[in-house]
Amino acid sequence: MTDLEKHNRMANAIRFLAADAVEAAKSGHPGLPMGAADIATVLFTQVMHYDPTHPDWPDRDRFVLSAGHGSMLLYAVHYLLGSEDFTLEQLKNFRQIGALTAGHPEYGHGAGIETTTGPLGQGLVNAVGMAMAERHMRETFGAELSDHYTYTLVGDGCLMEGISQEAITLAGHLKLNRLIVIWDDNGISIDGKVSITDSTDQLERFQASGWATVAIDGHDPEAIASALNAARESDRPTLIAAKTTIGFGAPNKGGTEKVHGAPLGAEELAATRKALGWAHEPFDVPSDILDAWRIAGLRSGQTRKDWEKRLAETDAEKRGEFERRLRGDLPSGFADAMSALKKQIATDRPTMATRKASEYVLGTINQAVPETIGGSADLTGSNNTRTAETSAITPDDFTGRYVHWGIREHGMAAAMNGMALHGGMIPYSGTFLVFSDYARPAMRLSALMKQRVIHVMTHDSIGLGEDGPTHQPVEHYAALRAIPNLDFYRPADVTETLECWQLALESRETPSVLALTRQNLAPVRTTFEEENLCARGAYVVADAEDTPAATLFASGSEVEIALEAREALEAQGIQTRVVSVPCMEHFERQSEDYQADIIGGPGVKVAIETGIRQGWDRIIGRDGIFIGMSGFGASGPYKDLYAHFGITAEAVVEAVTARVGG
């Protein structure tokens, strides 16, 4: 058997495992795995440094299937390599409840799945983030500990999505030469030929952004290997445009949209077996081919052992710091540093915008936690996300800790997911809260993947003033609170800002949003308490002496309005308490007894927040009073806007007295 014949049979093992699994599930996407099987065979058996016996080896090469609909490509490859997770039984249960072999790759379902993909383009930008993380770790700890490549297979859809442009230009600018993108150039999308919707010259597009490019036959193993090896030596990121036939081998459906997202069907699958000379039953891989794959799976074992030896010989302090960062543990001095700063805040009682409070707190955090990597989408001076400890990352120097993301909110959020997935750092970034709309798809995926990614989102309300309704978030609080496993924090003062930052950093499996004000806020908390009260999600900041006739619930900048209203109501003899609600998600995690105690019994319940009402009825009930927004904002000085929209202490007092008097 010649090398080419051996390669073809190894690639055909991928093709038929994928086609058989899709046929058994009666749904799925056989076209991409069949078309890209030659690419995957060369990549995983000849080029990538990946050890399936130690799939979490920190210095492994990463592979991201950005075109996640072709998930059976991944599952088939990892079964063939000898994965303990992706067994033949798992492949037979493709797309079934409880199986690791989900319709699209899901991070955490099994080793070798580096990220969750499916929404097109996300994986490409995750790969950019991983390449950024690798280079930062390499320049921080040395090539003896971090020296690997990131590969991603993208489809036409990935390159059509707008986020791809953000990824391409950023990676080219940063000269991420360890990033290798393989384009499965099959010319087909769901609606038919790509030419009916797009005529972009992708090679020129990438070249214009500073990439090296090469076009090859995606079914020629020698051309594939040559392109991959050349890309590893490039001083720029590389695009390999691999011309393939979708559904390769299918005599009637191959090369058409009919093989993209549906099973081949029994007749076509039988014809494909005949066309490719695969005389084996479904899910049956000949022993010699399986052995060849398993042997190939062991090829990186010595490379891994050499790395482990280098790690063991590394200076104990450096090794300990490297391993701590990869574990995701915070430094031992973090809690003490936060406590000391909290005491100082209680003494100084500063009045400042919570965006400035965040900058103040970050000064201590970035000293105590050296793995934080900050950034902003061209709003550094507004988001206040950069501190003295965070010098800029540049194309020629990745030892810094601050990324100038440019006006790329979506790409920023997705790349931070990749950085977090890579490990060794805690990414945070800044933009305006209203622009969470640009970043939301990636934020949703970080929540789905349980990644510690922190979004500093300033200018959080009509309080930003004159920039007007295009920049004033209204529905955004509710929209972000609606994402499962995303903590949305809206602190009311400096102390709460510190506590929210501490919670975000300690939440290893939950991404966070810190919604921060442009306008100054007076301190709500004026005494030191060791306990992190924001961890409760909601807590009493001003109580009534007796049973309250009214409870005022508020978040962020509206807590001071609630406190002012309480003074007026108490002066009228109406017993009133104020509850700060910095994080509804944390409140929902408290015991039923605690929640009941905070919500309280009979009495008027008022929620005050510069967003929409949605989400507050859980606390105030449908008959509760809501003082907030019911439409978009307007342009004007912020104090005038609060008065214009009736979000004032006077409005609260009027509403409560009308109800109590009634």
Image (tube, helix red, strand yellow):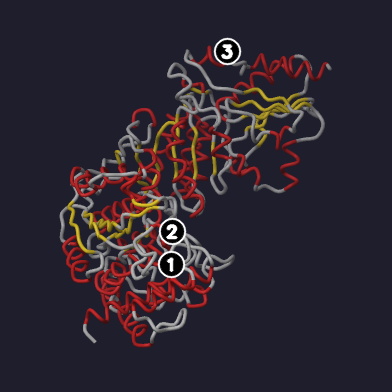
Three-letter code, disc 2: His
**Foreground pick, 391 / 169:** 169
* SS for callout 1: helix
**Foreground pick, 305 / 70:** 70
Three-letter code, disc 3: His
| Distance Cα–Cα, label 1 vs label 2 | 8 Å
Q: Which is more foreground, mark 2 or mark 3?
A: 2
Q: Which residue is mark 1?
A: 72
Residue 313, compared with residue 619, is above or below; it is below
Residue 385 shown left or right of residue 346 in the figure? left
Q: Which residue is mark 2?
A: 69
Are there few (<14), some (14-19), or many (20+) residues within 10 Å of tag 3?
Answer: few
Q: Quadrant of residue 97?
A: bottom right
Q: Which is more foreground, mark 1 or mark 3?
A: 1
Residue 617 seen anywhere in this rendered image of the structure: yes
Q: Which residue is mark 3?
A: 644
Residue 57, compared with residue 566, is above or below; it is below
The percent coordinates of residue 522 (x first, y second) are 53, 23
